[in-house]
Image (cartoon, rainbow, N blue to C red):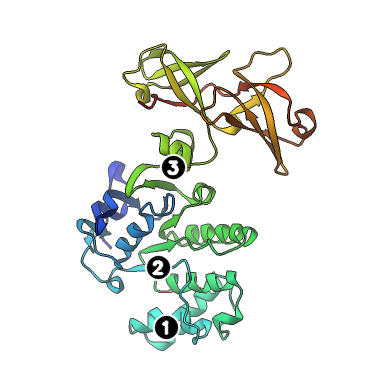
Amino acid sequence: MATVTGPGGTEIAVRVNEVSKRFGETVAVSEASLLVRRGELMTLLGPSGCGKTTLLNLMAGFLMPDSGTIAIDGKDITELPPYRRDVGMMFQNYALFPHMNVAANIGYGLKMRGIAKPEILKRVAAALELVKLEGLQDRKPRQLSGGQQQRVALARALVIRPKVLLLDEPFSALDRNLRASMQLELKEIQRKLGLTTIFVTHDQSEALSLSHRIAVISAGRIRQLGTPDEIYRCPIDRFVASFIGDSNLLRARLDRMDGAAATVALGHARVAVPSGLLEGVAPGTMVDLFLRPEQLRVAEDGAAFAVQGVVATQIYQGDHVDLYVDVPEATSGRVLVRLLGHEAMVRWPAGTRIGIAVGVREAIAFRPVS
């Protein structure tokens, strides 16, 4: 196996270099470049129609790029058919053969590769154990639950021992509890095998919980690449800030610029923000301040606050309560405040006027839209 290193000596398993793909006049992927490290779980995250599945299919070989190259372990695979790419693919609809039993479905890829029958039986048995389906090898897909079918599809992708595992929204058809369970199992299997995995989803919470790194995609372009924490706390543009998790957008005043940091004023609150995102903006200018719901709190009576508003509604979420508050300074006219516990249901019912304080010293602000 070739060793390809990236910045800092990191071993690179997959290299996507300025790849583009059009369908007629529609640009599905535009000059996408991506380095996937060996053994990491990389998520391609974005809204429906953003190009993430197209990019995955380009890596799998089901589509050919109009320009650019794709390499695995330093070998250019751009023109190779899917079966010669050493990748395992798990589809959104599982794509199991209904007339084959579980063992035959899992071993199909090995059979097509000419692997001897004793070896197929051995590897299928190991795959069944890995995905916790021992004893179900003789069942047909229709005799399995949705979660069990998903495990069969995962085992089929893993049994060929791919260099890279590609997953196209594999949990979208599952209910919430089963989805959470399968996410945990996938993460444990991926860690156990040390398998380079590229995962496509439009679910932000899924991406944040599973990934080593996330590539946020919009309109065919990779907007930001980073760890879940970097993506959530330090979005580099408005799209990433608004797409990842819940956020509030408020109008604030740029107070001063000081090297790499700037300070914005929102009522009595002063919040530090990166100055690079406000380059060219003069102090005194109104800017757009992004704050997460958990970064806000209800000010105690008599305490200083950033903004005032009226509680519009409450949403009980078990371990926390979401307060939706009508606030003039919010661009949408309303902010979301997330409070731990259940006391908010009694203390601040709909119609209550409250002060809202900022519970952090650092946040993100962007120059106003012209």
- Looking at the image, which is closer to me, 333 or 120? 333
The type of residue carrying mark 2 is: Met
- Where residue 4 sits: x, y (%)? 26, 53
* Numbered disc in front, either 2 or 1: 2
Quadrant housing the C terminus: top left
Q: Which mark is residue 119?
A: 1
- Numbered disc 1: secondary structure: helix
- Where residue 177 sits: x, y (%)? 64, 59
**Would you name the residue on which mark 3 appears?**
227
The type of residue carrying mark 3 is: Thr
> Are the residues flagged by discs 2 and 3 in contact, CB closer than 8 Å?
no
- Numbered disc 3: secondary structure: loop
Question: What residue lies at 56% left-to-right and 14% top-to-bottom?
Answer: 267
The type of residue carrying mark 1 is: Glu
Q: Which mark is residue 367?
A: none
The span from disc 2 to disc 1 (Cα, nearest Å) is 21 Å
Q: Earlier in the sequence, mark 2 or mark 1?
A: 2
Q: Is residue 14 above or below residue 325?
A: below
- Where residue 272 sits: x, y (%)? 47, 19
* Numbered disc in front, either 2 or 3: 2
Q: Is residue 293 above or below residue 302?
A: below
Q: Earlier in the sequence, mark 3 or mark 1?
A: 1
- Looking at the image, which is closer to me, 83 or 158? 83
- Numbered disc 2: secondary structure: strand
**Would you name the residue on which mark 2 appears?**
89
Classify 10 Å Cα crowding around label 1: few (below 14), some (14-19), many (20 and above): few
The span from disc 3 to disc 1 (Cα, nearest Å) is 39 Å
The span from disc 2 to disc 3 (Cα, nearest Å) is 24 Å
Compared across the picture, whether 266 is left or right of 12 comes to: right
Quadrant housing the N terminus: bottom left
> Are the residues flagged by discs 2 and 1 in contact, CB closer than 8 Å?
no
Q: Is residue 123 above or below residue 4?
A: below
